[in-house]
Image (cartoon, grey):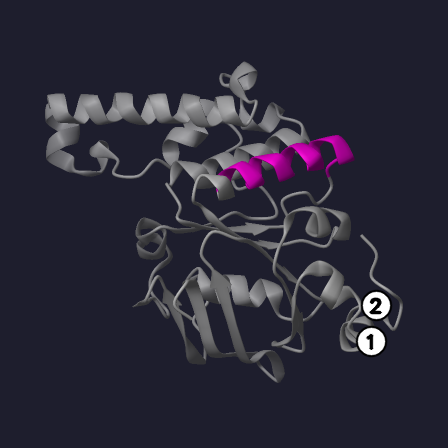
Amino acid sequence: MRDAILEVRGLRRRFGGVVALDGLDLRVRRGTVTALIGPNGAGKSTAFQCVSGVLRPDAGRVLFDGQDITAARPDRITRAGLVRSFQIARGIPRLTVLENLLLYGQRQPGEAIPAAILRTPAMRRREEELRERAKAVAARLNLSRVLDNQAAALSGGQKKLLEIGRALMAEPRLLLLDEPVAGVNPTLAAEIARHIAHLRDEGVTVLVVEHHMDFVASLCDPVIVMAEGRVLAEGAFAEVAEDARVQEAYMGRRRIHA
């Protein structure tokens, strides 16, 4: 597919006798917010883990923007522009919001020992650039007022926003979001949906795993449905919701409602 930023071809992964991915094929079109949904055990989380380099697939390929990243190290995948978030925020509790954001900035000057020792002008400029970027990310996510608070002191919803901010600091071209509105109230869920829509409008492609169907229906197009480690259906939310195979696999023949 010419406009695909992500292609997964024949991905397989077993855990002992359990087949988590059974020849998964999927494509994510550039400039979309694509949902990956399905019943528990469908293989969604395993697919995320394999695409982001956390797990090595047993077979198959993962192509990001035409480049084969199959089984590449997670840090290399992140630097290439494919960045994921986690359902449970992975920030460091004792660090402030600002410090957590800075931690995930790209091209950290202090990673090189000579620069860290000499404190070169170039290093100081990059540190200031990262600080300004962190403040801008916090502002767009309504976290400016808690910049100096420890991550442990944040509400559950603020931790979700910080997790998105952490991913944004890595300058993604493709953002994988794992249940970004799980456990948050409807008002914050709507705010997170607006943030994701703005990212799409700015050119960031988003692939999201989410169980809240109203969130998926309002934001995501297309929707990819997985079952038993494979793609079962794909299309607009209304189309897949009316698919009898999806109703059988996902909802036990009950209709999927937004």
Q: Secondary structure at mark 1?
A: helix
Place of residue 207 in the rendered image (x, y in percent of width and height, measured from the top left) = 54, 55
Q: Check if residue 185 falls in the magenta segment.
A: yes
Mark 2 highlights which residue? Answer: 251
State left or right for residue 213 relative to residue 24.
right
Residue 44 to residue 200: above or below = below
Give the vertical position of 83 relative to 103 (above or below): below
- Based on the picture, tell me whether residue 196 belongs to the magenta stretch: yes
Of 210 and 90, nearer the camera is: 210
Q: Which residue is mark 1?
A: 248
Residue sitting nearer the eye, 104 or 192: 192
Kindly identify the residue that appears in the image at 53 percent across and 31 percent down. Answer: 93
Could you tell me if the residues under marks 2 and 1 are in contact, i.e. CB atoms within 8 Å?
yes
Looking at the rendering, the stretch of residues picked out in magenta corresponds to 184-199
Identify the residue at image location x=89%, y=67%: 254
**Residue 96 in sight from this viewpoint:** no
Quarter of the rendering containing residue 38: bottom right
At x 46% / y 37%, what residue is drawn? Answer: 166
Residue 60 x/y as whole percent: 43, 80
